Image (tube, rainbow, N blue to C red):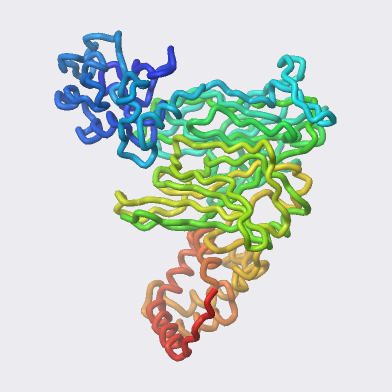
Amino acid sequence: MFADRIPNGEQVPHPCKPNYLWRGVGHFNVDGGGSRNPFGQDFDIGGRAWTRELCQKDSDGDGRTNGEELGDPNCVWRVGDIPTSSTGLSHPGVCEPIDSARCQQKQLHTGLFRTQQEWMTQSCKSAEFNCSAIHEAWYPDRDICKKVCYLCLGVRQQPARLELTAVPAKETTYICKIFEFEDNANDYHLIATEPIINNSYILHHMVIFGCEDGGHSHIRQREREGQRENVQTRSAYPCDMLPDRKCKTIISVWTLGLNGDCYNRNAGVRVGKNGLKKLAIQLHWNNPALIDSYVDSSGLLIHYTPHLRPYDASVLLLGNEHFSIPPRSNLTQVTSHCSASCTTRKIGHTINVFGLSTTCTTWKRGRKMSVELYRNNSLITTFTMDEHYSYDSPQFFNYDDAIPVEPGDVLKTTCEYSSTYKSRTVTFGESTQEEMCYAFLYFYPVQAMLASPMCTTYGSLSGCDPDTYKGCIGAEESKWYQTFPNIPVFHNITDACHPFGPCTAECMQAILAAQEAEPCLTSGEAWDRIVEWSLTRKPEGMQFLAALESCEIELYELSRAKNARVPSQSSPTV
């Protein structure tokens, strides 16, 4: 988006891929976004403008000034001018020749890459989508895999993409589209997806979801902010983190830096007659410059075959959906446990994990990512330990020998963040100014999964572990979502209390009585979730919270006094 602020900004060649352009000139990622390379750092320091000082600098240290590399050797170019030269260009942030010892050993002052050699090793990888699943035939009875012609396999393609759609002038947009699988008369296995990228300037990631039967016809209905809204499923529509409450099963994920998603030779996602008949694609657009002229028709190309694999596959979602990162912190660690109770409830028998994506959706503050497997309190394996995680350079880990996960195992997801240069607390959320902590485990057989393949936590709350809710579960919890404000506690407190005070005796008595009768009010994080997902979204909910606020200080002092009267007990060493 700053390409027009430097000479030949849209014509900078890739240092190791002929006929390729490096569109994100100031970034480590070829398409832009994320951490800045040496030239990008100098450009940022100089006010993001082409100045004589920036022109005369040698940002990459290869002996040529930035102006010489970008076709402005005399540093006379101004925005809107035609550059002095548009030939013989080179990248002002990459020391060349890239295979020289001096350039390979050049130190990069970033947590993403230590040396230019590491950076170029990543950047020079082939962009071709190499997926044996769509080019090889698997013979399980002979335990061999043979390369055969593409058409002989019967592999077919169906695009799942948007029609040309205007991109809103807002930083974060989630856009979705639901579509029919094209042949529901027969069974197929979806075995791979690869990106169809129309606008790389705003596209951050894409997800394909499977949709349950019965919830979708030509008209899709959803409820948003109390209003029922009809959405034509043949058109793209703004959405949230899920395309629809009937479309929850993640099938495939793409994000910046990935060439495609390739399934294990033993498995595929069943689609068609006895499988998924409707799919949804979700795109995340990131438009921090608020440009109102962008359009996009990106999507994913689905590869599927009538030659079914031995097993049906799916994706297990792990992660934490409630946390905060304090400002100016070198390290904040966020964890989530898919507990033994959860895997016992969700997994009927062994599942085999054949891939993991560290598109684990940490944004710009993410530094490290890991997913660990524990059995009987012992570490069995680490699926991934991404020591230098970056949201624009994700990794996909394939396991030729699938890793078994048993009922009763524990899956621990850890995300580490650095907020050294942030002055405000960062919370969980969908935008790139917020943070997420998700991981995607690809597994088979799907028949072993007894419940939805999602095992996320809300802070320490786990849907599989009732004890974490401190009594605020089942009917006690659901009434705050489904029947509120038509519950007695709402009227008792709003009748007795004035919004935001003063704290009267009647108000204090009503709140204390409510805390005795309503376990959710004193349940900690379970109550936090009710406040976030229900009360703050309704006028009556805000009225109720304002009434509770009346005696907040008095209740805090009462709690401290009670705790002071309880003798402390030393805990045994674990």
Residue 395 location (% of width, % of height)? 52, 37
**Which picture quadrant has residue 563?**
bottom left
Specify whether 76 is left or right of 437: left
The C terminus lies in quadrant: bottom right
In the displayed structure image, the side of residue 375 where residue 296 appears, left or right: left
Q: What residue sits 44% from the left and 78% below the top? A: 497
Q: Position of residue 214 (x, y in %)?
A: 75, 42
Residue at the limit of the structure toward the front, as seen here: 101
Residue 74, relative to residue 260: is it above or below? above
Position of residue 177 relative to residue 458, above or below, is: above
Can residue 434 be seen from the camera position used here? yes
Residue found at the far right of this picture: 141
Q: Residue at x 38, y 23 (%)?
A: 23
Q: Position of residue 198 (x, y in %)?
A: 50, 22
Q: Nearer the viewer, residue 396 or 324?
A: 396
Is 103 displayed left or right of 373 in the figure?
left
Res 277 visible:
no
Q: Nearer the viewer, residue 298 or 334?
A: 334
The quadrant the N terminus occupies is top left
- Location of residue 267 in the rendering, given as x and y in whole percent from the top left corner: 74, 35
Q: In the rendered view, does 336 fall on the left or right side of 95?
A: right
Residue displayed at 68% across by 49% down:
453
Which quadrant of the view contains residue 392?
Answer: top left
344 or 520, nearer to the observer: 344
Could you tell me how many numbered marks the image carries? 0
Q: Nearer the viewer, residue 429 or 269?
A: 269
